[in-house]
């Protein structure tokens, strides 16, 4: 664990919060947050992209939504168990570090 990650984990523990993580190499920016399609042609300079399902994505917002979904997928057995407010909200509405420790 790096120094920044250690600091975040320690701070969250003192505040009674939980930190959720995803794998380092998961396709958070290349995966459509609407349908799950992986856009292997996406380049680093592409800031926006359109999916084959018709969804239009800002690269950073799409990645944030996917990171949240991936983190919750690691702690819930099925998508049905994820509360609706977490499953459908944007990162600004429901930040990961605001989730109470179970």
Image (cartoon, rainbow, N blue to C red):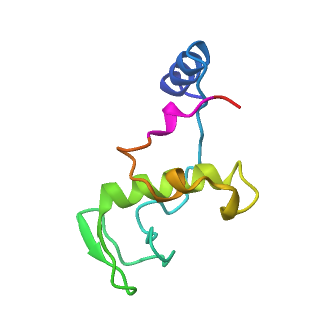
Where is 88 relative to 100, above or below? below
Q: Position of residue 17 (x, y in %)?
A: 58, 25
Looking at the rendered structure, the number of numbered marks drawn on it comes to: 0
Can residue 23 be seen by looking at this rendering? no
- Which residue does the image show at 50% across and 32% down from the upper left? 97
Extreme right residue here?
A: 77
Q: Position of residue 81 (x, y in %)?
A: 70, 57
Q: Position of residue 45 (x, y in %)?
A: 23, 63
- Does the magenta run of residues contain 99? yes
- Which residue does the image show at 40% across and 57% down from the upper left? 63
- Which residue does the image show at 76% across and 57% down from the upper left? 77
Extreme front residue here?
A: 84
Q: Between 80 and 73, which is closer to the camera in this rendering?
A: 80
State which quarter of the image contains the C terminus: top right
Q: Position of residue 85 (x, y in %)?
A: 50, 52
Where is 10 relative to 56, above or below? above
Q: Residues in magenta? A: 95-100
Can residue 15 be seen by looking at this rendering? yes
State which quarter of the image contains the N terminus: top right
The reply, left or right, for residue 42 in relation to residue 98 is left
- Which residue does the image show at 50% across and 63% down from the upper left? 27
- Does the magenta run of residues contain 63? no
User: Which image quarter: residue 58?
Assistant: bottom left
């Amino acid at each position: 664990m790096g120094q920044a990650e250690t600091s975040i984990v320690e701070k969250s523990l003192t505040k009674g919060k939980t930190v959720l993580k995803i794998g380092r190499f998961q396709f958070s920016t290349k995966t459509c947050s609407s349908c799950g399609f992986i856009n292997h042609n996406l380049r680093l300079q592409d800031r926006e992209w359109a999916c084959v399902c018709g969804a239009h994505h800002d690269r950073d917002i799409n990645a944030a939504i996917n990171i949240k979904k991936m983190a919750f997928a690691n702690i819930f057995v099925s998508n049905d168990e994820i509360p609706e407010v977490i499953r459908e909200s944007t990162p600004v509405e429901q930040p990961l570090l605001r989730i109470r420790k179970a």
